[in-house]
Amino acid sequence: MTDTLPIQDLLTLVRPQIERLNREIVADLAPGHEEMAPLVEHVGGFRGKQLRPVMTFLSGMAVRGASHGGCLGDDVITVAKVVELLHTATLVHDDVLDSANMRRRIPTVNQMAGVEVAVLLGDYIYAKAFHMAVQLPDPAAARWLAETVRVICQGEITQVLHRFDFAWTEARYFTVIAEKTASLYAAACRLGGHYSIGTENSGGLEGRLRALEEYGLELGIAFQIVDDCLDLDGDERVVGKSLGTDLSKGKITLPLLYLMRRGPGEAERLRAVLGKSEAEALKRLRTEFPLEHAVAYAMEEAQRRIAKARASLSQLPAGPARDALHHLAGFVLQRRL
Amino acid sequence: MTDTLPIQDLLTLVRPQIERLNREIVADLAPGHEEMAPLVEHVGGFRGKQLRPVMTFLSGMAVRGASHGGCLGDDVITVAKVVELLHTATLVHDDVLDSANMRRRIPTVNQMAGVEVAVLLGDYIYAKAFHMAVQLPDPAAARWLAETVRVICQGEITQVLHRFDFAWTEARYFTVIAEKTASLYAAACRLGGHYSIGTENSGGLEGRLRALEEYGLELGIAFQIVDDCLDLDGDERVVGKSLGTDLSKGKITLPLLYLMRRGPGEAERLRAVLGKSEAEALKRLRTEFPLEHAVAYAMEEAQRRIAKARASLSQLPAGPARDALHHLAGFVLQRRL
């Protein structure tokens, strides 16, 4: 199996579902409310590659092997919408936390309408997502996703509380990125499978659901490691956001953990760089530290995670959706998602 | 029936339930997580008179007349916890929106741990509350409360977007305060009744549930009107928060709507006061406008709402819980809750 399919080819399989999701999601958010409509439409502009719903749909197909015939029930569509809305809510609040002005080349909500509206709109989108989840007859998604959002927030809070914490360890780093980032990918995959097979079959197929969950978790961890590398050595024009923000905020990511441990005094040398302005911190890191080695070290970990994600797919029946999940994992490492 | 029972007497009826709620709610929020525990405990200090859970419990008793024997099932306790947690989450985010430093004489989360932690902790509490709601076998609470939080945010956003809007009307004011404040009281009462009688009986008792919902809605509207009056003519030591913030932020409340309409040019005169510092805006309002008349006008509306809330109680069987709800409504007008 080659690893170099263009991403468009993978998405062909789920294009009808993604198109339906995009048609319905804005209307779902603001049913005819004149104040909310422009805000909700603006947030629609943050839409990226929609990795999470793509993974939900592919998981829904992959769990059934060839028996889905390209069709997925309405409940899988609903789950994918809920996952995408929860992700959107976290983006709106992340932009508040980072005082970010731009996202995907349009103004953030806090930039456009102020911090107050941004905090409230994030809450609004969370509530709407939960409301959609609790309309499903099977409560699994509502339960799993409420717990997932709690875990995301716990991870984010832990990260904020441990900025500039030079006692930070790789183990804690992996726990936090699993919580704040990978848990939603894991949920997207597991629940896509769960709602595709229906509750009556889910007992016998628990092994497949666990495999999808692990696939999402490992892929999500790799995604965050790559994201953390991009903040240090990415190309601003390609990444589409300003670099060095983690450094400036004192976030201890995997490449920094590598640099801290290189020898005695290294943590102290690094402490002098963190907390500077983004440009200065980046410049000093690039000139005074072996950044290439640090990034290579982190990317090796990301590769191992992707290999693990792919290995878990062996629990699923062979077929084009499983192949697509295999290929999709490779795009995370291409660092342009 | 006298209207002047001390509030302690009313609360006797639900003391066991309130004590259980307070025992369990902090442990529920942070099961053994070392980072979250101190934050969650701090937020426990925001606890006030716990009007909403009191109303949930009294509603649960009142809907069944004498047949509850002072007992309420676990599901009613869970609903009351969820309502209290959702209220707590809105407080944590409100303090971010208002850049408030103190709440109930202790530091706000944003003051103590920063805006980032406060935004994330509010999200965490929302998620935890929804997670508790979706554990209930009957999905009514999860559905009703997710929609309620959406409506609360919609009301708050509308209010923010219409600051300094001199085309604001009483009708829109009432819609917004019903959304942002009264909807949670309505949910607290309706769901207390709903989970007390159980799903099997709820069809036949829909009239009682609607009565409880209306009671909560009208009481909540009255509560917000009184709160808006207190911001203008309260005693800072009694109210426990700084006054004049609505004026300073350009919130057009009922007393201001009265003043704006007194005659030609009044809206313009008022515009010169709004947006000033809190102390200056208050001082000018008190010296240049008939503030007493404006507050009396608003308080008459609050009284009408309380009368309406009480009238709806006639749909419920007579008994001590119904009497307690009747009296409780009066405390809202005493302006010290």
Image: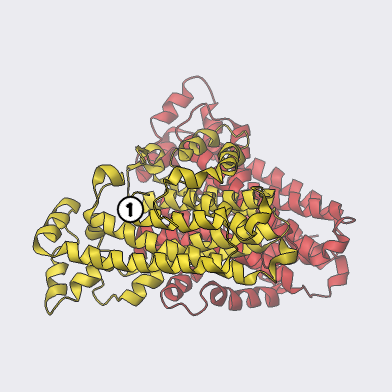
Chain colours: A yellow, B red
Give the residue furthest to the top.
Answer: B264
Callout 1 crowding tier (Cα within 10 Å): few <14, some 14–19, many ≥20: some
**Where residue B239 sits: x, y (%)?**
49, 57
* Residue B206 as seen in the image, left or right of residue B244: right
Residue positioned 13% across, 78% down in the render: A263
Q: What kind of residue is marked 1?
A: Arg
* Residue B194 as seen in the image, left or right of residue A261: right
Give the residue furthest to the left.
Answer: A288
**Where residue B37 sits: x, y (%)?**
45, 75
Rendered-image quadrant of the N terminus of chain A: bottom left
Q: Closest to the observer: A122 or B157?
A: A122
**Where residue A165 sits: x, y (%)?**
26, 72
Residue at label 1? A335
Residue positioned 84% across, 55% down in the render: B208
The image quadrant that residue A199 belongs to is: bottom right
Residue B219 in view, yes or no: no
